[in-house]
Image: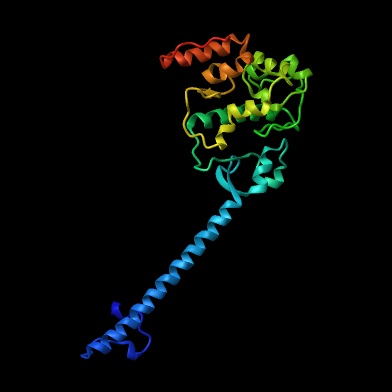
Amino acid sequence: MPQLMEARASDDDWTGMTDAASRRRRQTRLNTRAYRRRKAEQAASKAEKMGTQTARMDTVPCWDEENQQVALLPASVARAIDAPVIPKGRLHSRLLFPLSSDHLITLIQVNTLRAIMTNGHILEEVLPKTRYDCTGGALQVLPNLKNLHDVPESLLPTRCQSLVPHGAWIDCLPHPGWRDNFIRAIGTFDEKDLASDIAGWLSKGTGAIEPGMRGLIVWSPPWHHTGWEVSEGFMEKWGWSVRGCEEVLEATNKWREIRGEPPLRVT
């Protein structure tokens, strides 16, 4: 019987007793045991939750692109992702980046990140010992790839890329003039600030895309500039990088016209 769940001996059974005082004493005994059991269970549950929360505080959720899953990394390891070079063996993956606390990543953010990664992978296939990822890396120069048919024309290295040491991320931009503008300006702008505007907001909990965002939008195959759009915020802050790149501006205004938005101009 449910009312006898806490009974441990025959003298705990109050059913069938005609003496009201004796019946109440046994019922009180069972109710007291039930109360103490519930309090003990609540305390154990609270301790378990606190232990889980403490464990989570010591880890950071990161997206593992190679394995296409969320990986919980020790906080000290996750912080090292911002370092210029991340040893592959240490993180057990070729690319990871911290997620925002709510894990919300918009489609625009995903497309931008994947576009940069895709162009990097294309170049990686024909550049032995060269590694492209979102962590930056050492400065490099590219060999002459004009005779290679596996590389889209828009990604073929310029003279600047072949002569001037630069960050690998520049090679992933699908327009030669755009890449050259950044290479010529190396040392005059904060590359980490630029990276944060383009893709760093993935890990800063910015779920909504605001009109003033300073990033890039990719709508079609990433190796061609016609699928890229420069946001209004990017133009205001980094507009100097697309000076002389009329094709990039034309592509941007084409996408803006579809949405009924006014064209952008380089100031």
Residue at the far front: name it.
Answer: 21
- Taking the image as shown, residue 144 lies to the left or right of residue 213, namely right
Residue found 64% across the figure and 24% down from its top: 172
Query: Is residue 253 or residue 227 the one in the foreground?
Result: 253
Q: Is residue 22 left or right of residue 129?
A: left
Looking at the image, the residue that sits furthest to the right is 163
On screen, residue 153 versus residue 204, left or right, reads right
Residue 147 in view, yes or no:
no
The residue located at (51%, 64%) in the rendering is 47
- Across and down, in percent, residue 205 comes to 52, 37
Q: Is residue 75 visible from the viewing direction of this image? A: yes
Name which residue lies at 56% across and 36% down: 204
Query: Where residue 16 sits: x, y (%)?
Result: 22, 88
In which quadrant of the rendered view does residue 160 lie? top right
Q: How many marks?
A: 0
What quarter of the picture does the N terminus occupy?
Answer: bottom left
The residue closer to the viewer here, 12 or 99, is 12
Q: Quadrant of residue 150?
A: top right
**In this rendering, is residue 244 above or below 209?**
above
Above or below: residue 41 compared with residue 127: below
User: Residue 167: percent from the left, percent from the top?
Assistant: 72, 26
Q: How is the image coloured?
A: rainbow
View extreme (left): residue: 18
Q: Quadrant of the C terminus?
A: top right
Q: Is residue 255 left or right of residue 173?
A: left
* x and y percentages locating residue 209 in the rendered image: 48, 28
Above or below, 194 relative to 180 = below
